[in-house]
Amino acid sequence: MLTESNLQQFDTAHKSPGYNMNKLCRQVSIESPAGASRDCVFNFEVPVPDVPPNGARIRVVCAGACYRMRNRSPSVSSSSSVQSTEESYYSGNHGIRDGALFPGYEVSGIIDSLGDNVKPTDDIAVNKRVILYPYDGIPHGYAEYIVVHDLSYLVPIPDNLSLGVAAMLPTGALLAKSAVFTAHNYVSALLKQRPADQICRILIVGTGGLALWAIRIAQHHFETSENKDRVQITVASLKDDGFKLANELQNVTLVQWNEEVHEKHLIDRTKDACKGLVDIVIDFGTTSRSLHRSLQCLSPSGVVLVSDEVAERLLPKFSSLINKTNQKIEAVSYGSIEQLKELVTYVASGEIIPPPYTEFSAEEASSVIQKLCRSEIPGRAILRFHDIQ
């Protein structure tokens, strides 16, 4: 196993005159199924990227599998490509082939080389462990080496934070933190208007990686805020295994959204669990049905927070409804790099416990995707390219 103690020896060897990188490295491409083919994972050899003069080359160690969609192809309309790829892939139906579906946004690794114009620092130097902030144009993460032209997007990670956990932070955890931060603004405004003995109710919908991060981050955030005892968090679980994962958390009310149950019963069940209508919903459900149900559980003038991608697709369908009810659907964008650095600190210190995850070698990508389609992997799946801890 490559460890931090012998990483320098490895690095010296691979830069020696006798060592030839062959100018090629491995890249894994994960795409949505097309036609009758079940193959959606492809391996390529691509050129090892040159180090930009003012940037760095990163040796990718871990990358989160199957998370979010990249900007869609200009040949397909934005809303239709989101809906078709999501629905066709996750339902197991054959859909369009879109290599942008799983780009490997969540990346952790080791600085392999710095550009000629870069002066090393305590945090940014060869062999330092880093994650990448998800800036516009972030390179494909399912390759052994990627380059970053602007070092300000690199976030150092401490030695006590595993690279597998670190790989989950730049997108899933960061979007969840951004949603909780947005919710905080509404919570503060509401509680200022209410008597001291009244609370604010938050409903978090979903039990995938996003929702599990949101639960943990919300618990930590509101337990350490001035409104510690005035925020009630309820989780609406969308599937049985997610319910079990969420059930491990303390001080969180749980309600299961079983799709086989009549809609009115689900709404009544949720209202009972929340002890009334909620003030804020953080909805990572991604479907029209989930969003409509969330609105039925929301108080007048309440707000539902959804991701940018979901808002782009679903907001036009609900605009007339929310105008009548005086409710609001707000899109949440990715958080700032400062928030990402805060996440690194909280997770490394143990103040926020990451959701369950399983690591797989990059060679197992094909079987991992099949298992994800069958919901056989609890929590997150992480692809590991190098055995570096």
Image: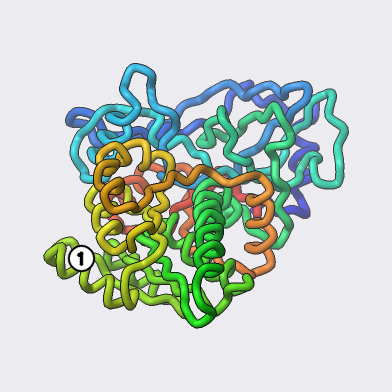
The residue under label 1 is which amino acid type? Asn
Element under label 1? loop
Does 73 appear above or below 366?
above
Report the quarter where the N terminus lies: bottom right
Looking at this rendering, what residue extends furthest in the top direction? 75
Q: Residues within 10 Å of mark 1 (few under 14, many from 20)?
A: some
Residue name at image x 83 percent, y 29 percent: 118
Percent coordinates x, y for residue 379 in the rendering: 42, 60
Give the left or right position of residue 168, taking residue 346 as reference. Answer: left
Q: Is residue 341 left or right of residue 231?
A: right
- In the image, 168: left or right of 157? left
Can residue 63 be spotted in the picture?
yes
Residue 37 x %, y %: 22, 31
Give how far across and how far down residue 92 sits, in percent: 21, 43
Q: Residue at x 66, y 63 (%)?
A: 346
Seen at 65% across and 55% down, the residue is: 389
User: Which one is in front, 209 or 30?
Assistant: 209
- Name the residue beneath numbered marker 1: 258
